[in-house]
Image: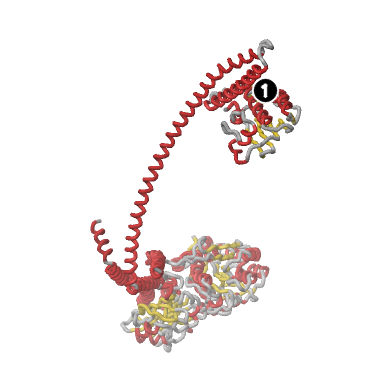
Amino acid sequence: MKIVQKIKIFFKKRPALLIQVVIIIVSFILIFSYYSFFQPSMASVKENIVSQRRSLVDASRAELEASVENNIDSLSTLSDKLILTENELEKKKMVEKFMRENSLFMEISVADLSGQEKIRVSKFSVFDSQSLPNVSETQGFQGTLKDKTYLGRIEMTKKATPYFEIGISFKGAGDDESEVLLAQLSLQEIWNILSNSRLTNPRQKMFLVDSEGFLIGNPSDNSLVLKRENMLSYPGVRRVIKDKTDLNYLEYRRDAKETRIISGAVFNGGLGWGVFLDEPRKQALLAYDKIKKVSLIFIILTSSLLILLIANARELRLIFSDLNQGKENLDAEVKKRTEQLAELDKTTKLLVGRDLELLEANRKLQEMDTIKSEFVSVAAHQLRTPLTGIKWSYLALLESDPGSLTADQQKIIEDGLKAINHTIELINDLLNVAHIEEGKYGFNFSKKSITELIENTYKRYLPIAKEKGINLKLEFDSNELHELMIDSDKMSIVFDNLIDNAVKYTSPGGEVALSVRGKDGSVEFKVRDTGIGVPEDQKHRLFSKFFRADNALLFQTSGSGLGLYMVKNIIDRHCGTISFESEENKGTAVSFSLPKTAACIIDK
Amino acid sequence: MKKTLLFLILLAAIVIISTIIFRNGIKLKGLSDLVSSKSSHSKKYAIGVVLTGGAYQQAFDGLRYQLAKEGYNEGENVSFIIRDVRGDTSKLPEAIQSLLGENPDLIYAISTPVTSEVKKLASSDIPIVFNAVGDPLGAGFIKSYSRTETNLTGCSNLSAELSGKRLEIFKEAFPGIDRVVTFYNPENSFSTLSIQNLRPAAMALGINLREFEVKNTDELRDALAALKTGEYDGIYVVPDAMVVSNIDLVIQKSLELNIPSMAHEQTLMEQGVSLAYGANFYDLGSQCASTVISILSGQKPDNIPVITPSKLDIIVNLKQIKESGREIDSAITTEADKVIF
């Protein structure tokens, strides 16, 4: 790792040198891959292709030569047997037997030195021994006399069966050459050998040409043989047949579209035949061309890269420099950001600390609030007891014999009683609020008719309203007795507060209406007045503790501001909802609804 | 900055192209396979085969064997749709019609009557490869042996051509026969051709040949009835369709007269003929495979020469000969290609 680091640092400082090294390496890859892989691969593949084709040609040649030689040998053996007898009938039988054993011989004749045939045996016909011809003028007879063993050209029977003539001269009973054996050998076996050549693809064609260049075997189309097609003009054929030289590989252009390759081998001995393998170059050299193509593309691309590197060496160096500069800038930026993050971390820690402090302060405030509530509760209790005593004393004074108090005294006591009642109400409200906040505001639910409760409240406030000149109305939507799960004492507080407020803040001549309407799952109540209303900017505080609107303070000096707070809490405990609509100097409508089912109340 | 971007794009392009080339390069792994892979005939060919059963089955077996040897394996790249009427030639039209409905790539028709019927029913577009046809030229199947100039080509068993040679072998097998009787329909050109080949051979062999011209079964029956014991030494069966179809009558007579019979086809050996000389149907079937392959490779039949048999068989029905109490030359039995015991 240390060496790698050192190299990195070394080149970091010398970008120009790095580019030069890269150019050298790319050049090396280019040269190395061409000479170590592409060139030997191409050479090897081509050599393989050529040698495979030559093997095919050589194998076919060997097989064909062996076939011809075997047949000549067989004929020689026959001639050796024929020497043994001078009886023509026996000789004929020997030939018949031979032909049955060697089915490719179509016809065999035996002639004397004058050319007169003495025996002629055919697979197909019968010849009268008395009328056999003289063959002294034939090429086969003369050739045999001349060379002892004669191999003739390819001929056709009337039935288009190709054959060639083999002639052998042999000794008679004496030592002199006395007889000539002429045999017609069918080319069928030669064709079979060619057909059975192990060609590697269907577009390969193997053909056989005789010493004069005539086609004598062409498995892909033997009709050309029957047409006596001369192949000397075919590329490579003349070279093999006339120069008697084997042909490893020759590329030639058959037409504008196709280039072909041909391999050929000449027969040893006197036959002078040639066997050839011909096929499209594209097919034969598929693998070679593919490697060539790939190597060409590789060389072009690598050379392009090299040229690009050389041509842009300066720019590349600048790019490296830019990159280095960029990296430095980036490092600086990272450092700066890290510092900023550290600062941010400090601030975050501070904020978390503040949050904890606030949580602590809030907890203390809640504690203080509880202490305050407990204090109010205790203080209110302590105040209410003596005040109740004073109230009863005042009532005893007022209910004493008339005449014991003067009119002024009675007035003073009545005013005092009023003040005490008002104070007791205030203390009751305070106690209720304290209980609500402490969670000690006990509820006692039971199924009761709320209709009755409303009517009682209505009756209680009717004289007060009348006295003030306010029209108090009670509206039911039906005669149904709405029985609900309620705490009737608490709900009395609700209705009392709402109607009391409505009456209190409505001027004489105005109207206060309490309406009840049954709905699907609930009962809706509404206390509507034509009073002073709630100023728009103070509406959000309507259900807050000790809230009294500015216009309310002017209109009515007394009031604790706790009524609606309690109302909301009681409605909430009854799983109800409360809302209001109000417009200053026009009136207020407070609506609340209570559920008909008790499930929510029980769950709470 | 623009130059840098351009350079990076170029570099990326080179990498992508190189990857593609490299991936193709991997395929070069099997170079030797590519160079030496043995080709296979990818298309599947359907060959219709029509035959009358019996020994003709061998002409089909030989073809099937040789085709498989050349890479045309049944079920892989070649299928045979076979219509074998089992000797009942009256069923040929129906069998050929049903075969044509299967759209074969070529029809391989075995024997002259089968080829005649196929030629009549099939369109001239479909190549027909005949086999075991004695005289395709005389039957009008081809214009010449080297160039057929029709949609037919195939393999001839040269049964007419061999008439003379057959008589020679008959004499060789039974040296004592000097008087031979034969029957032929003079209206059948093929029979006439056979007789023309037979006469010079008889003369050369010193055989007295008695020819009966019979135009129908009744005439044949009458001619056979006229034969007397000791009048003839052997019966020579000319490849005449009418005579061959009544071969049982001829054989019956030969047994009655206790004289041997000579015929041209292996099929007749099963009926009880004493001796036969002719093409080996199995070998001829193998020879015919090259014609079938040439046609499947796209060559037109009119340019493919007719193949003649490279192998001719002597078949001896030794069982029949022994039953009739006659002797056969031992050399013939030894050299025979097939002996029925």
Q: Secondary structure at mark 1?
A: strand
Question: To which quarter of the image does residue A546 belong?
Answer: top right
Vertical arrangement, residue A4 with respect to residue A414, above or below: below
Q: Residues within 10 Å of mark 1 (few under 14, many from 20)?
A: some
Foreground pick, A446 / B87: A446
Q: Which amino acid, mark 1?
A: Lys
Residue placed furthest toward the right? A479
Image quarter hosting the N terminus of chain A: bottom left
Which residue occupies 42% across, 39% down? A355
* Residue A78 appearing in the image: no
Image quarter hosting the C terminus of chain A: top right
Query: Image check: B204 left or right of B102?
Result: left
* Residue A418 appearing in the image: yes
Q: Which residue is mark 1?
A: A448
Foreground pick, B179 / A592: A592
Residue B120 drawn at (x, y percent):
64, 71
